Image (cartoon, rainbow, N blue to C red):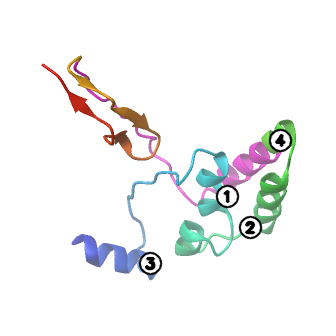
Amino acid sequence: MDANQWIDDYRASKLQMTLAPWGPDYPDVLSYVEPFGKTDTQVAAQVGYSNTAVDEALTRAAQAKDAAARETEYAAIQRQLIEDAPYAVLYQPTFQNPARKSVQGVTSHFAYTLQLRGASKTE
C-alpha cells in the first residue's frame, strides 16, 4: 500500500490490521505506554482502545515521585494491556552502528540512532 494512503487510512481507523514501527519520543516508560494505553491518545485512539483502569493507573504513574510506586503502577498497566490484548507487539528493534577509528565525535542517540553533529574524520 502506498505510504500516504496507509497513513490516511490508519489515522481514520479504516484498517482492520496493520504493521507499523514505533519509537519513543523520550527515554521514559511513559513514552512507550501512554500512546498505546491512554484513551483518546495517539495509537489507542486509532484502534479504539479504552480502559478507565489503565487511564487512571497512567495518571498515577506519571505523577508518582517514588520509583517503586511508578514501577508498581506500570507493572499493573502492563498486566492489563496483556489481558486486553489491543496490540500484538512483534519485536523491539535494536540498532548496531559500525565504527571506524578514523571517525570521531559520533554518538548514539536513543531515538535518532546516530548523532552526527560534531563528527569528524581523520586519516
Task: Label 1: state its secondary structure.
Answer: helix
Location of residue 84 in the rendering, given as x and y in whole percent from the top left corner? 67, 58
Say what amino acid the circle numbered 4 marks: Thr
Horizontal placement of 100 versus 85: left or right? left
Separation of residues labelled 4 and 2 (CA atoms): 18 Å
Left-right relation of 24 to 108: right
Q: In percent of the image, x 37 and y 79: which residue is there? A: 9
The boundaries of the magenta stretch are 72-100
**Which image quarter is the N terminus in?**
bottom left
Q: CA distance from mark 1 to mark 2?
A: 9 Å
Tell me which label, 1 or 2, sits earlier in the chain.
Answer: 2
Residue identifier under label 4:
72
**Circle 4 SS class:** helix
Tell me the residue that label 3 is attached to. Answer: 11
Identify which amino acid the numbered label 1 is placed on. Asp
Q: Amino acid at mark 3?
A: Arg
Judging depth in this view, the residue of 4 and 10 nearest the camera is 4
Q: Nearer the viewer, residue 39 or 105?
A: 105
Q: Which mark is residue 51?
A: 2
Disc 4 + disc 3, Cβ < 8 Å: no
N-term-proximal mark, 4 vs 2: 2
Q: CA distance from mark 1 to mark 3?
A: 22 Å
Disc 4 versus disc 1: distance between alpha carbons? 18 Å
Circle 2 SS class? loop
- Image quarter of residue 121: top left
Image position, residue 63 (x, y; %): 83, 55
Residue matched to label 1: 84
Circle nearer the N terminus (4, 1): 4
